[in-house]
Image (cartoon, rainbow, N blue to C red):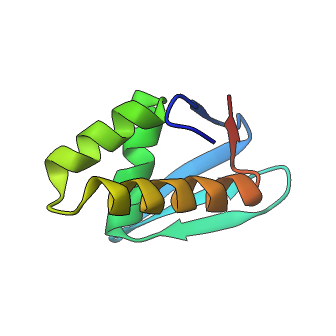
């Protein structure tokens, strides 16, 4: 995974907001992932921007955290979604 990587949500994944959480559910595997407010924001940026470099730039504008910390957190988040097979890296 690099900053040039792009993310695509699988077609079988449904996204639903419940209270202050976001639930991602793969209809094929019944695998799901629950996201808090920050995770939901990360996911929304991934869905909109697709390319990790663009997501990182937006995160730098939104949070007062070092770029390295944001990059580490973004990569960990993407890896977790990928391991659950909710997204694909391109």
**Residue 74 in the image: above or below residue 90:** below
The answer to which of 80 and 24 lies nearer the viewer is 80
Is 76 in front, or is 7? 76
- Residue 76 appears at what percent x and percent y? 55, 62
Q: Position of residue 62 (x, y in %)?
A: 17, 51
Q: Residue furthest right?
A: 29
Q: How many marks?
A: 0
Q: Quadrant of the C terminus?
A: top right
Q: Residue at x 59, y 57 (%)?
A: 24
The quadrant of the rendering that contains the N terminus is top right
User: What residue lies at 58% left-to-right and 31% top-to-bottom?
Assistant: 5
Q: Quadrant of residue 30?
A: bottom right
Report whether 81 appears left or right of 67: right
Front residue of this view, candidates 37 and 53: 53
Horizontal placement of 74 versus 29: left or right? left
84, above or below 44, in the image: below
Identified at 71% across, 34% down, the residue is: 11
> Which of 13 and 6 lies nearest the eye of the viewer?
6
Query: Residue 79 occupies which quadrant of the picture?
Result: bottom right
* Residue at horizontal 41 percent and vertical 53 percent from the top: 71
Give residue 89's position: percent from left, percent from top: 67, 36
72 sits to left or right of 34: left
């Amino acid at each position: 995974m690099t900053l040039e990587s792009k993310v695509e949500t699988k077609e079988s994944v449904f996204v639903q907001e419940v209270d202050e959480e976001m639930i991602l559910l793969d209809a094929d595997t019944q695998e799901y992932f629950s996201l808090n407010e920050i995770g939901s924001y990360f996911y929304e940026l991934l869905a909109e921007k697709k390319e990790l470099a663009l997501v990182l730039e937006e995160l730098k504008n939104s949070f007062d955290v070092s770029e390295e910390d944001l990059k580490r957190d973004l990569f960990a988040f993407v890896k977790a979604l990928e391991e659950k097979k909710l997204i694909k890296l391109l």
